[in-house]
Image (cartoon, rainbow, N blue to C red):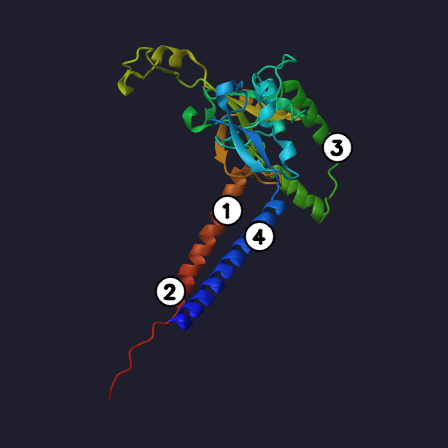
Amino acid sequence: MLKRLAHLGVNVTVLAISIVVFVAAFLFLQMVGAAGTPPPVTLLAAARNLDIGDVLAQADLAEITAYKDASTSLYFTADQSAGVVGGIVTLPVKAGQPLLKSAVISSANGTSRLAAALADYPAGSLFPLSLDAANVAAPELSSFLPGDLVGITVVFANRPQNSLEENAAYNFQAASAPTPTPSPQEAALQAQEERSQPPMSKDLFPGGVRVIAVQGLPETIVSDTKTTSAQDAYLAPSNYAAARQVLVLLVPRDSREVLSLALSQADLIVVSLLTRGEEANSPGFTYWDFEDWFKHDRLEAIQSAVAASATPTPTPTQRP
């Protein structure tokens, strides 16, 4: 009996020592992990989806906790909320995302809501593109959101004619001047120039331009009574009918004249939603390019059909 108690005492002692060692190791690892973890920092985040031009109120701000690193200095911290309220959003921000310092500009300098978008784009201009124009084809206004990337394609069906005096002077000079024999390279360039005539189309901004604001959407009016139901919300048709449908685009400053001329003279302007832009400029497309494309594909189809009909069909082997 004594031997059993002595043996049991040894086992209890070993178990107790094991528990103590485990707890000590666990606490040591916890201390090492805590020593290597960066300190937490509380950042300001968007409580809702924010669009360019929105004026921030306290209800638009939320707080999130993150670990401090080299990038946290780019965001507003919770103790800076007083300076953020009243600021103007210059970049779209999703709900829950921390607020970049570059995404908010102070309104103390008198900057307007839309002009705040130019804070980070000094070489840009805010251009109003009216979707109500007869020569503009675009998706419904509700399809656009601030921050969307759009492309603008201009189509000219005819070229404006010069005055009679200019045509006469041009014809006289062309008739009196001798015509030298062009080199093969010059002849190829001349042929290409002659085919670069309307009808033609051209992408003005291959890289796309950003939508800064969407103006003319119907407003949802909701009753102020506490018994408001979902059926009480309605669209105001009178306000919607009177509002102009306009996309405010961020375009390069040196493109305002080109876009203005296109809106005035083009037979058709197509506004397209893009997922990404292209780096290279578009060479454009003319009716003559379409004709060459048509002839090429048609010739390939005819040649394939002729080749298929000329191939002999194998006859089945007859048994003796």
Q: Earlier in the sequence, mark 1 or mark 3?
A: 3
Q: Where is residue 288 in the image (x, y as percent from the top left)?
A: 53, 40
Instruction: Tell me if mark 1 has few (under 14), some (14-19) or many (20+) residues whose alpha carbon lies within 10 angstroms of its own.
Output: few
Q: Residue 177 bears which disc, if any? A: 3
Q: Which quarter of the picture shows residue 239?
A: top left
Q: What residue type is labelled 4?
A: Leu
Residue situated in front as seen by the camera: 213 or 159: 213
Q: Earlier in the sequence, mark 2 or mark 4?
A: 4
Q: What residue type is labelled 2?
A: Ser
Instruction: Tell me if mark 3 has few (under 14), some (14-19) or many (20+) residues whose alpha carbon lies within 10 angstroms of its own.
Output: few
Q: Earlier in the sequence, mark 4 or mark 3?
A: 4
Q: Where is residue 182 in the image (x, y as percent from the top left)?
A: 72, 44
Q: Mark 1 points at which residue?
A: 293
Q: Which quarter of the picture shows residue 112?
A: top right
Q: Residue at x 47, y 51 (%)?
A: 297
Q: Position of residue 262 (x, y in %)?
A: 56, 24
Tell me the element at label 4. helix
Q: Residue 29 bears which disc, if any? A: 4
Between disc 1 and disc 4, the foreground one is 4
Q: Mark 2 points at which residue?
A: 309
**In the visual, does 291 lie left or right of 177?**
left
Between disc 3 and disc 2, the foreground one is 2
